Image: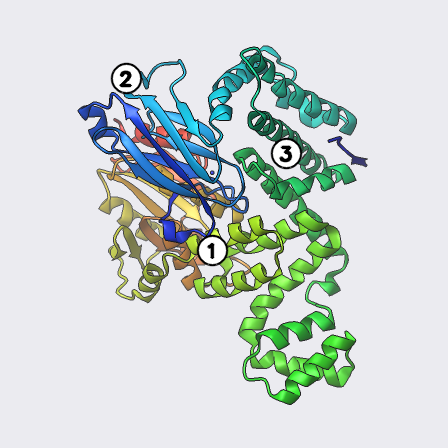
Amino acid sequence: MRFVISLAILVCLSASAFAATDSLIIQGRILNLNGRLYRQAPSITFSRNNILQPQSELSKQAPLAPDGSFRVSLPMLYGKEEIYLDYSGKAFATFLGSPGTIEITFNGDSLASKNRLFYFAGVNAEANNQNYTLVNEEAKRIRANSVLGTRFYETFWAKSPTEAQSLSSKRAELKLSALQAVAATGIVDPTLKNWAQALANDEMLQNLYEYALTNQYALGKDLLDSLNRLAQSPLTTQRVTWASRFGTFADRQIDEKKATIPSRNNSLPVRRMAYLIRSNSSKLTASERERLDEIISKGTAEKVELDFLSNMYAKNEMLLNLLFSYERESRFYGEMFDSTAREFLKARFLPRNFHKYTYSQQLRLSQHIKSTLTIPQFRNSLDEIVKMEVRDSINIEKFIAFKDVRTEPTEALPGYFISASNERGTTWLNRMTDLYKGKTIYVVKWSFDDPKSRDDLAFIAAMQAQLPTDVVFLFLHLPADEVFVSGDLVKQYIIRHRLKGVHMFLSSGQAIDLLFKLNPIESGTYAIIRPNGKFAQKNAPAPAELDKTIQAIWQARGK
């Protein structure tokens, strides 16, 4: 059955980490900044999104001068992007940025006030100033309409496709009706109108993709055609979230197609194979280049030519394996999706698979993928997050090279401890909990090859930033049952995702031995141990449930 529609783990970056692009200069002042507030909160954090990685907000801190003034620059990959201001948890704002300069002022004496706090000048100033009225009015209308507002998702998934389409459209209209309140005070700024329309329509699209995923429905052409919006301004959290849901939908569709034609999963057209070998093989002789050019021109090959391609492949197998894995997946993108959607999926391939590659492989594969992209926003977005991903290469090398591992947790890098033991699992774990008695322990049971584990662990750094240093994070790495997991890749992942704490790499026997003591002994599960060494929760909330998990740890800590 088909239906159609009508129509940012916080990562702090230096300026050099970004792709060369236009910048937004953010400057301003906190008025009436007293000495106590300055000491408590001496900087402001500004964050923005990346279309390819919804779990990351790309952030920079702007230090405050004693007079409350600040200045910082952020790159702009899209013409207009949502920017998020966080003043040390004391004040928050969302505003629209563009290349140029924006000025923000707010009063340090009014941080607890419910009245308007932020005032804007410079680029998009009128839209940002009017947005205060829009957001408050939209919240009122959502609260007042239970069917389309507060209780919308309680019944949405059980509706028919036609009803789901209608309700999603009406909810978007309800949100956009808040513009009437802005119009009552004067002329609605066109930039604000476009921003509001983008948010409402992108939420509608996300709802329909969620509906399709939940109810196993195919998508109509109108919904697929809407994907050209992914390369358009403004870039918002809502658009990044919707893009992520499309990616999940596309993954499911591709997996289903692969299952129906398994013979194609490991194949590429002859012309493409020859081109990749020709473009990425070093020290080719003149006759080899000529022969490859002939195969590329013909697009077909006899057995002798296939044998030749096989021999050429073997000479540079490691690199070509890397490129061919992407090309095989990209082939399905081209067959199943058009233009913008295909480009988005190609750019998303590496971020979705970062954990599978060393940083040198990430750099090489990103170069190849960028050479196949024609949409600048996607190419620059990929470049930006690859530079983020490989920036820890020196620490990764040190962590991988560290060999002085003992049963007693040994600090391989500041904040990163490794323990190794051939003891029974229960004996080893008891040794660790006894060592840290007097401290609260958050036990992380995870597996590198488990997507849920990786999703949850993206929140660990944020958790640790909000907890005292006497909370110990104990990571139990569970062995993979059916796949080989590279220890070097696991260590790379630990450093890249700031998984500070004590790391225990369990064997299968040790994991089984812990079955009753640490039930459930499954990846993506968690436990909390009180300072007295007894369990507060054997099935504790996950890091992704950030507020709930932090509260549970504070309760177990007893303070």
Q: Is residue 465 visible?
A: no
Q: Amino acid at mark 1?
A: Val
Q: Amino acid at mark 2?
A: Asp
Callout 1: SS = helix
Residue sitting nearer the eye, 420 or 109: 109
Position of residue 244 in the picture relative to residue 439 (left or right): right
Q: Give the image location of residue 39, x and y in percent.
A: 20, 30
Within 10 Å of disc 2 (Cα), the crowding (few <14, some 14-19, many 20+) is few
Residue sitting nearer the eye, 425 or 254: 254
What residue lies at 29% left-to-right and 53% top-to-bottom?
Answer: 416
The residue to which callout 2 is attached is 109
Position of residue 321 in the picture relative to residue 384 (left or right): right
Q: Give the image location of residue 459, x and y in percent.
A: 42, 40
Within 10 Å of disc 1 (Cα), the crowding (few <14, some 14-19, many 20+) is many
Q: Marks 2 and 3, how far apart in space?
A: 39 Å
The residue to which callout 3 is attached is 206
- Quadrant (top left/top right/bottom left/bottom right) for the N terminus: top right
Earlier residue among tags 1 and 3: 3
Residue sitting nearer the eye, 1 or 34: 34
Within 10 Å of disc 3 (Cα), the crowding (few <14, some 14-19, many 20+) is many
Q: Marks 1 and 2, how far apart in space?
A: 41 Å
The quadrant holding residue 556 is: top left
Label 1 vs label 3, nearer the camera: 1
Residue 386 is labelled as: 1
